[in-house]
């Protein structure tokens, strides 16, 4: 990721400058300084990046209706998520995501375990041409809320069928433009981290226009918030299947929803044996 590379290069230059500038290299006792300083400068650089995002957000109107995806904002979010996981000491063990390299206009679904699910997926996807369908509350998150609104992310009120249908139609337009859409069909997180029923309506994104459906399973993302930074966390994201749009087109949404749910349930059950 470009942002991570820039921050790492700046941190390395700063830590070496500190090490040699203070002549610490003349005494081996101080060998640990550039190592510790590297991480410190990296985190400081990321903090500066967040401040710049905050300042830039002052000029963003989150309530403005947007008909197109802002690719720069998507790229910025994509890279910020990648660096955030480094800072939080989260290792994402991804499997199969390389299959999506060069792929456009697909519907990506997964189970929903944590507020970090979207961050994990956006950080590891091989492209930034992805927007998320998310709950309205996420658009009020300081700093992030305004940028996801600018990017073109879609808030969905699942209590309103009319609003939900409107969001699905807008997401279809994005898909027709080669923008991929990530959504969690459960709609909300379960407190017991168990897989819940899928909303059939979500799958109109795939079946109505014959868009490819990518089924992904997540594990352990709910543990990230435990001991943030203090402990290293291993989370898992695995592509279980990519269904060609020609196979999904015109199929009953309840049938595709059940198939996707069962696919993820079978995978998760395999880890409990």
Image (cartoon, rainbow, N blue to C red):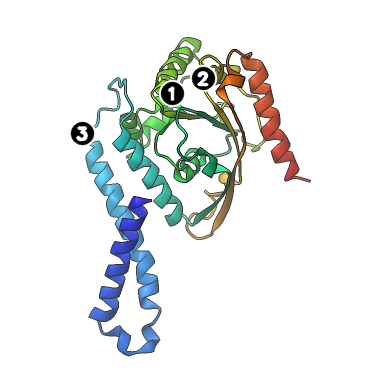
Mark 3 or mark 1: name the one nearer the start of the chain: 3
Q: Residues within 10 Å of mark 1 (few under 14, many from 20)?
A: many
What is the spatial separation of the Cα atoms under label 3 and label 2, in whole angstroms?
Answer: 32 Å
CA gap, disc 2 to disc 1?
8 Å
> Are circles 2 and 1 on residues that touch, CB within 8 Å?
yes
Can I make out residue 142 in this image?
no
Pinpoint residue 107: horizontal percent, then vertical percent.
51, 27
Residue at 31% from the left image edge and 20% from the top image edge: 67
Residue 52 placement (x, y as % from top left)? 24, 47
Residue at image location 53% in from the left, 14% down from the top: 208
Q: Is residue 79 left or right of residue 240?
A: left
Residue 59: image tag:
3
Q: Earlier in the sequence, mark 2 or mark 1?
A: 1
Instruction: Give the numbered dot on residue 175.
Output: 1
Mark 3 or 1: the one toward you: 1
Give SS at disc 2. Answer: helix
Which residue is found at the position 72% from the left and 45% from the top? Answer: 271
């Amino acid at each position: 990721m470009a942002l991570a590379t820039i921050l790492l290069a700046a941190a390395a230059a700063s830590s070496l400058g500190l090490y040699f500038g203070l002549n610490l290299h003349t005494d081996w006792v101080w060998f640990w300084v550039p190592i510790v300083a590297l991480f410190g400068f990296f985190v400081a650089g990321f903090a500066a990046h967040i401040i710049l995002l905050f300042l830039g957000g002052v000029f963003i109107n989150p309530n403005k209706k947007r008909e197109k995806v802002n690719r720069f904002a998507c790229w910025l979010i994509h890279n910020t998520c990648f660096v955030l996981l480094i800072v939080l000491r989260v290792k994402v063990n991804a499997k199969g995501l390389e299959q999506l390299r060069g792929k456009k206009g697909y519907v990506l679904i997964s189970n929903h375990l944590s507020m970090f699910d979207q961050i994990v997926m956006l950080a590891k996807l091989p492209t930034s041409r992805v927007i998320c369908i998310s709950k309205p509350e996420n658009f009020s998150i300081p700093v992030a809320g305004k940028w996801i609104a600018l990017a073109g992310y879609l808030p969905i009120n699942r209590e309103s069928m009319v609003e939900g249908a409107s969001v699905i139609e807008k997401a279809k337009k994005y898909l027709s433009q080669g923008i991929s859409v990530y959504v969690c069909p459960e709609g909300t997180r379960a407190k017991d981290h168990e897989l819940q029923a899928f909303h059939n309506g979500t799958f109109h994104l795939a079946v109505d226009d014959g868009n490819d459906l990518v089924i992904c399973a997540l594990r352990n993302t709910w543990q990230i918030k435990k001991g943030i930074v203090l402990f290293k966390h291993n989370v898992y994201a695995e592509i279980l299947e990519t269904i060609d749009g020609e196979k999904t087109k015109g199929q009953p949404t309840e049938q595709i929803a059940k198939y996707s749910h069962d696919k993820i349930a079978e995978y998760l059950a395999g880890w409990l044996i």
